[in-house]
Image (spheres, rainbow, N blue to C red):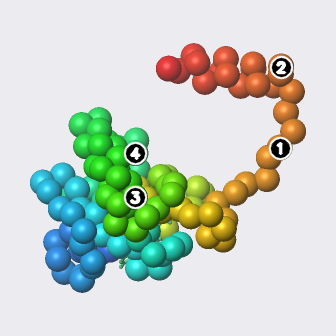
Amino acid sequence: MEEKESPVRGSCIFCRIVKGEIPSTIIFEDDILVSFLDIAPAISGHSLIVTKQHFETIAETPDEVIQHIALFAKKLTKAMSFALAAEGFNLLMNNKKVAGQLVPHAHVHVIPRYARDGIDLNWRPRKTLPNMLKECAEKIKRFL
Ligand code: 5GP
Ligand code: ZN
């Protein structure tokens, strides 16, 4: 049988931060989420919003928790505009190792952006055709 990739709760680094077992620079906390500064930031102010309960990805995270995180992310961007003079933001959530998720505990990155900040989040655009777009959209739409 294939071994499950997600860690047992006891060894999950973000669960340990939530429990206060590992120090972190917390900027906000309530019953549902904790937000703290990323230890290896893309830029100063790069923050993480982490669910208090252990869920691996967006798929397992309850709708009301996602809603709460989204509203907090909005509030955080506003705070970053005032506090850090951020001119823009990237909100980013990596889901699964294949998408770059290093910590398998659901979290959203909030990255303040400035002109010429040198942060590179870009992918190389691929060529496509109208019929390829249509075919792909049809496939997805069947499940929505
Ligand atoms: P992911 O690739 O899973 O979306 O991102 C995980 C993020 O968590 C990375 O940006 C990484 O720097 C951050 N991180 C990993 N371990 C710790 C930690 O112990 N403390 C803090 N504050 N951030 C962490
Ligand atoms: Zn966890």
Give the label on residue 126, or none.
1
Q: Position of residue 40 (x, y in %)?
A: 47, 79
**144 lies left or right of 77:** right
Residue at 29% x, 38% y is: 67
Give the label on residue 81, or none.
3
**22 lies left or right of 116:** left
**21 lies left or right of 72:** left
Q: Which callout, 1 or 3, points to the residue nearer the camera?
A: 3
Counting residues from the start of the chain, the first of labels 3 and 4 encountered is: 4
Displayed quadrant of residue 79: bottom left
Q: Nearer the viewer, residue 53 or 40?
A: 40
Is the distance from the Cβ of mark 3 to the nearest ligand 1 atom less than 8 Å?
no
Q: Are marks 3 and 4 in contact (CB under 8 Å)?
A: no
Task: Please tell me whether mark 3 sits on a helix, a strand or a loop.
Answer: helix
Task: Please tell me whether mark 2 sits on a helix, a strand or a loop.
Answer: helix
Q: Which residue is mark 4?
A: 58
Counting residues from the start of the chain, the first of labels 1 and 3 encountered is: 3
**118 lies left or right of 102:** right
Q: Which residue is mark 2?
A: 131
- Real-space Cα separation, disc 1 to disc 4, in angstroms: 26 Å
Counting residues from the start of the chain, the first of labels 2 and 3 encountered is: 3
- Real-space Cα separation, disc 3 to disc 4, in angstroms: 26 Å
Badge 4 local density, few (<14 within 10 Å), some, or many (20+)? some
